[in-house]
Amino acid sequence: MTKIKSPFNREEQYAAKRVAVIRAAGAAFRRKGYHNASMVEIARTLGLSKAALYYYVKSKEEILFECHINVYDAMDALITSTRNKDDDGLERLKKLYGAFAHLLIRDGLALLADVDSLKGEFQTIVLTRRNKIEHAVTSIVERGMGDGSIKKADPKITVFFLMGALNWLNVWYEADGRISGDEIATQFVAQMSAGITAL
Amino acid sequence: MTKIKSPFNREEQYAAKRVAVIRAAGAAFRRKGYHNASMVEIARTLGLSKAALYYYVKSKEEILFECHINVYDAMDALITSTRNKDDDGLERLKKLYGAFAHLLIRDGLALLADVDSLKGEFQTIVLTRRNKIEHAVTSIVERGMGDGSIKKADPKITVFFLMGALNWLNVWYEADGRISGDEIATQFVAQMSAGITAL
DNA sequence: ACAATTTTCGACTCGTTAGTCAAATGGCAT
DNA sequence: ATGCCATTTGACTAACGAGTCGAAAATTGT
């Protein structure tokens, strides 16, 4: 069996395992909360010892930070990819909201509430990123209110309402539950849009 | 100056202070999360030492438990008080939802997400209570779907969507913010009902 | 086979924080 | 004043969990 050039492969392995660590930790954080999920526990789910984790990661806080960033990166990407010149505000929001829902359901990603467990720079960056997302969504809503597709109201409240519904997903949605992810996403979009569509 | 019968007064004082402790702790939990809020810190906001707290309370976990129970008690009361024979499902839900919103905004009460920090009995009880509330709300939604006032859909998803928006309030709403509580509650009810009203 | 390097682990340290306790404080009635 | 009881405290203990480190075990290249 032919092997790929070694040094490159090594880095890849390392990176892949690092990602696995962060994913496993993220899952644990989502299920039990940051402080209730211990490093030993996370290690065990990967069949590793706690010490081994620190070969891939600098600290527990760093993991939490990356979990947050991963979600925001994915969301930023969705904001870009769902942007479409021809769509009015409502249509844009529907596409984006559906994409967000899928992201949170399908992938192991979760909007963590544990921002307060991050200190200093870490927290500042995460909050900035979150604001950026919220601002982008708010812009879409404002656009919709401008072009007449979305009912006029306070855009901030509108957005918080919608984002709240998404965040709560983490708490009750179990990937193996009997309700399919698609079904949830579809109904979320429907309920969201019905709530704000201009008459 | 005439004093009220002493022993009774004493108990009242004690009870009042106990409540103050729990309220202060609840506020801290809401702001920083259960684990990030230390007992020393909570004590300081009350001008007390940590040890004094334990004169009123058995453990930190007990405080968290009571915080949860307080909210659920208040919600149960609202479920009862907003029930009205003449209202259809949608109308009932609007009244209840508005009352919930007010509860979370006005009073120091918050739907805490930290259920996982509770162990054993404590957790079981809290989860049971939460289920009870969700079930009651779901019933109202189902009633509305039956009487034609609410659009047919999966009632569970509908409810989770709506409760999520409420839960998220804690994260962004600051009592001193520039948006008034009434304004938020009103828009929440409007957005909620528009999202589910049968056409 | 063997050396070099990556990966993993057991056993430790260290800091933090919940919780305890014996003693001090303060109000109040007599 | 004095004694009684409620309240508060400083100083302590105990437990838990993050993070470290030197050595062992895999893995890989020659």
Image (spheres, coloured by chain):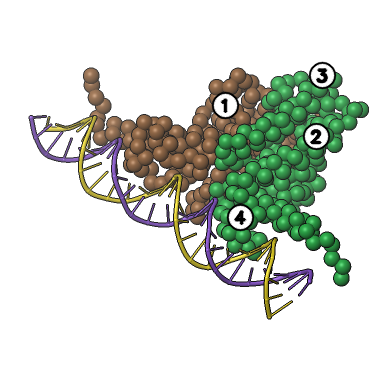
Chain colours: A brown, B green, C purple, D yellow
Q: Residues within 10 Å of mark 4 (few under 14, many from 20)?
A: some
**Circles 4 and 1: CB distance less than 8 Å?**
no
Closest to the observer, B109 or C21: C21
**Circles 3 and 1: CB distance less than 8 Å?**
no
Can you give x and y, in whole percent of width and height, for residue C2 in the image? 9, 35
- Determine the chain carrying the residue at label 3: B
- Determine the chain carrying the residue at label 2: B
For numbered disc 4, what is the local secondary structure? helix
Distance from disc 3 to disc 1, alpha carbons, whole Å, reads 28 Å
- Is B165 rendered above or below residue A186? below
Q: Which amino acid does label 2 sit on?
A: Ile
**Circles 1 and 2: CB distance less than 8 Å?**
no
Which disc, if any, is residue B54?
Answer: 4
Q: How crowded is mark 3: few (under 14 residues within 10 Å), some or many (20 or more)?
A: some
- Mark 3 lies on residue: B146
The verdict on a common chain for dots 3 and 1 is no
Whether residue A155 can be seen here = no
Which disc, if any, is residue B79?
Answer: 2
The verdict on a common chain for dots 2 and 3 is yes
Q: Name the residue located 87 percent from the left edge and 70 percent from the top edge.
A: B1
